[in-house]
Structures are given as structure tokens and as C-alpha cells.
Image (tube, rainbow, N blue to C red):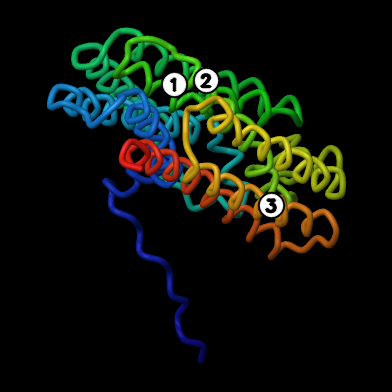
Amino acid sequence: MNPPAMTAPRASRWQQYYQLTKPRVVQLIVFCAVIGMALAIPGWPSLQQWRVMLAATVGIWLVAGAAAAFNCLIEQEIDARMKRTAWRATAKGELSRVQTLLFSGVLCGLGMLLLLWEVNALTMWLTFATFVGYAVIYTVVLKPMTPQNIVIGGASGAMPPVLGWAAVRGDLGPEAWLLCLIIFLWTPPHFWALALYRSEDYRKAGLPMLPVTHGNEYTRLQVMLYTWVLLAATLLPFLTGMSGWIYLAAALGLGLRFCHYAWRLWRSYSDELARATFRFSIWHLALLFAALLLDHYLLPWM
């Protein structure tokens, strides 16, 4: 007689709502926004600036979480057909569409009010535009229509440093747009590395991701080309005087390593290598921006 099959315990209601916010993705978004805030301040933040930074961080997190929940709502049926996302509470029917929409709306509303009252109107409207760009333009329009969805839609995902800069400066400096450019160019090779080893999932879901529409080999070539363009873009903060030698060393080391991953992926594909490339891409961006922060605070003392 076979033993009864073990089933995974059902997540609590709070865990289900929390998972809708895609916490790992939102953590990276908020981290990049905080870097934008720190770089916008010439020295160590004052007490007032710390207060603004805290309010901006919470507000951006709330709106980013709302956008993620709205994405889960729109892609409920798609998520149910994909192994990577079938565990989500919306895909399993554990949270209704009304519950998810209400949750997203409350998070977005609270985040926007916090940004308006404690930060400034510019940051509020930019953050709301980012919400619309990701949750509506990318999710509803671009993702099911074109294999360039992640390239075009990546503009909204690249906005966090601009939001952070606007929060403490109240303007849109060129330095913020330079950081935005780096994330914009980082997004395609990061996401396509994932799409390569999840291509069957996307095919079953009917989504026109690049590996599905143009094939594995073409996508690998695009990943490699983008990593070299990204490497060139990451040198711009040093070349424009925005950063110093600490950042330059990190940008070169991380960028060349990313290019090496992409080159190996292009020459000899395997799912495991695609996974490793995807994982490294996350570390690449996080460590690159951490190096910018380190350089920003250590450079005056060197």
C-alpha cells in the first residue's frame, strides 16, 4: 500500500497577499531607487533628508508592490499555465480578482498619498506613470503582442533611480537618466536569459517571447550583444565624473564577467548555463549600484 502523497501546506492569507507583491523583484527596484536618492545628495544626508528618503522608499515600495499585484491579476490565466508561476495565489484561485484588484488599489493609493504628502508631487506622478507603464502598457499591451516587449517595457522598470533622484532633488538631473539608461540596457539580457530556459513555459502560455518567436540561437546572440552595449554604458558614470576609480573597477569586473557568461551561452547553450547567467545578472546590477554608493561616500576621503 502506497503512503499518502504529501501536499505543500497552504500559505496564510497574509503570505498570499505578500507574495502578490513579488518581493524579490520589488526589493531590487527599491534598492535602485535608494541609490538614486543617495547619489542626489552631495554629502551625508541631513535629518530632514533621511525623513524624505524613508517616506520615498516606503511610497515607492507600496506602488511597486501594487503594480506587481495588478500584473498577477491580469496574467492570472497565463500564470496558471506556466510552471514558474502556477503557485501564485491568483493562479490557483485562492485569491479572487476582486480581492487582488482591491489589494493593488489600496497599496497604490497609500503609496501615492505618502509620496504626495511627505515627498513631492513630481515623485508621486513619476511613480504613478511607472505603475501605468508596467502594469498596463507592458502587461496588457506589449507582453502579449511583440517579442520586443521587454525592451520597450523595460523603460518603466528602469525608472527607480529617477524616482529616487526626484524625491530628494525635486528635479530630473542627467545623472539620474544615466542610471536609468544602465538599467534599461541591463533588462533585455537579464530577462532573455530567463526566457531561454523557460521558453516552453512561454510557448504554452502563448506569449511571444523572443526565444519563442525567433529561436534559441538568435536570442543568445542578442543577449551577448546587449551585454557589450551594457558594459559600455556602465563606464559612462566614470567618464562623466559622476563616480571614481572604485566604481570603474567594479563596472569593468562585473561587466566583463557578464559578457563572459553571455559569450559562453552563445557558443554552447545549456539550461543550467542560462540559469547561471540569469542569477549573475541580478548580482551584476545590485553590486554595480552598490559600488556607485560606496564610491560616492568614500571618494571625498580618498
Among all residues in the image, which is located at the extreme bottom? Answer: 1
Are dots 3 and 2 in contact, CB under 8 Å? no
Among all residues in the image, which is located at the extreme left? Answer: 47
Residue designated by label 1: 162
Judge the density around disc 3: few (<14), some (14-19), many (≥20) Cα neighbours within 10 Å.
Answer: many
SS assignment at label 2: helix
Label 3 or label 2, whichever comes before in sequence order: 2
Residue 143 lies, with reference to residue 275, above or below; the image says above
At 35% from the left and 46% from the top, the residue drawn is 16
At 70% from the left and 62% from the top, the residue drawn is 273
Q: Let me know if residue 78 appears in the view.
A: yes
**In terms of image quadrants, where is residue 59?**
top left
Q: 46 or 138, which lies in front?
A: 46
Label 3 or label 1, whichever comes before in sequence order: 1
**Is 302 left, or right, of 160 in this rendering?**
left
Q: Let me know if residue 98 appears in the view.
A: no
Residue designated by label 2: 177
Residue 198 circle label: 3
Q: 106 or 292, which lies in front?
A: 292
**In terms of image quadrants, where is residue 144?**
top right
Q: CA distance from mark 3 to mark 1?
A: 31 Å
Q: Position of residue 182 (x, y in %)?
A: 58, 32
Q: Position of residue 218 (x, y in %)?
A: 86, 43
Amino acid at dot 1:
Val
SS assignment at label 3: loop
At 70% from the left and 44% from the top, the residue drawn is 192
Q: Position of residue 150 (x, y in %)?
A: 66, 31
Q: CA distance from mark 2 to mark 1?
A: 6 Å
